[in-house]
Image (cartoon, grey):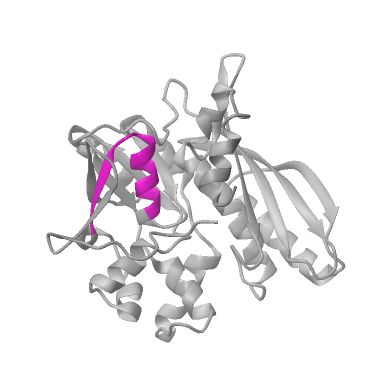
Amino acid sequence: MSGEAAFIAALRAIATSPAARGLADDAAVLEIGGSRLVLTMDAIVEGVHFLPHDPPDTVAWKLVATNVSDLAAKGARPCGCLLTYPLADDTAWNTAFLAGLQQACEHFVIPLLGGDTVRQPEGSARSFALVALGEPEPNVAVPSRTGASAGDIVWVSNGIGDAGIGLSILRGESGARPADRDALIAAYRRPQPSPDLGVALAPHVSAMMDVSDGLLIDLKRLAAASNLAALIDLDAVPLSQAFVDTVGNDREARLRAASAGDDYCLLLTAPPTAQASLEAAAARCGATLHRVGKLAEGHGLTILFAGEPIAPPPSLGFEH
């Protein structure tokens, strides 16, 4: 067995509880005494999710933010987290990580409840895991990837692709103006998911998830989970001015943005009649939604540019 999708498919034979949602979602939803608890766990690994020279405080921030992003996509407010920490003999690194952890927990209002420390073997890559717990609003369905219908509109929040360019800058593969460099790197190292936005949108969506591995691959996953086909209009994908100034605004630039990972914005679907409600909910949170496509009967992903279908890139996004 090889590949992430094959391994998850095999796990479904074990994860038979209804709370697991068939492992087709970003989180579990556990019912306890009439209440619901949303649970998620994300891990980040050196050389996979962060660079060896990334500052320790930003590693901690990203660990918390990626988990909060999953809660936001389920319309859940953070209520606590549990940390697994590999303890290395590097006091300065540990201290800086803890400072970043405290800053992130305070920013996202997610208290640290406990966890585990283990010894990190000398010379091994650092690896961290966080379990995050969230509480959905009463009487509001917890959005999944599976609830979309043919005819639904596809929306995203925030810009797409900045984190991918930030990573390229750190690897020395791209340049950027001094005015843009810090913002693009921050998009990679310090993502800014919004639980308030997820909670506000949840009553109006048919399906919702976060964009972590790339807009194209995550939209394809959402459509597949709902047994539908997806169409995305590259011209409508929101790009920041910093991205455009650094990479451009042509087809290749837009494909690069839509297949980059680490955006941690929300990807959602809803019927056309929900547009006004969605935009009003986003406005209350100081956010803007961008209409980027639609869902239809069938399967697969169609990419449009200038109104015409184009060939997909070699990779739609990140896969383990």
* Magenta residues, start to end: 217-233
**Left or right: 20, with 181 as reference point:** right
Snapshot quadrant of residue 174:
bottom left
Q: Is residue 105 visible?
A: yes
Q: Is 214 or 156 nearer to us in this picture?
A: 214
Residue 142 within the magenta-colored segment of the rendering: no
Pick out the residue farthest to the left.
Answer: 307
Pick out the residue farthest to the top.
Answer: 33
Q: Is residue 281 visible?
A: no
At x 37% / y 42%, what residue is drawn? 222
At x 43% / y 36%, what residue is drawn? 199
Residue 222 within the magenta-colored segment of the rendering: yes
Snapshot quadrant of residue 35:
top right
Q: Is 27 or 17 nearer to us in this picture?
A: 17
**Left or right: 53, with 176 as reference point:** right
- Where 250 sits versus 197, above or below? below
**Left or right: 134, with 317 as reference point:** right
Percent across and percent down for residue 40 are 59, 39
Percent across and percent down for residue 177 are 39, 85
- Where 81 sits versus 169, above or below? above
At x 39% / y 53%, what residue is drawn? 217
Image quarter where the C terminus lies is bottom right
Pick out the residue farthest to the front.
Answer: 1
At x 61% / y 66%, what residue is drawn? 50
Snapshot quadrant of residue 215:
bottom left
Percent across and percent down for residue 46 are 66, 65
Q: Number of callouts in the render?
A: 0
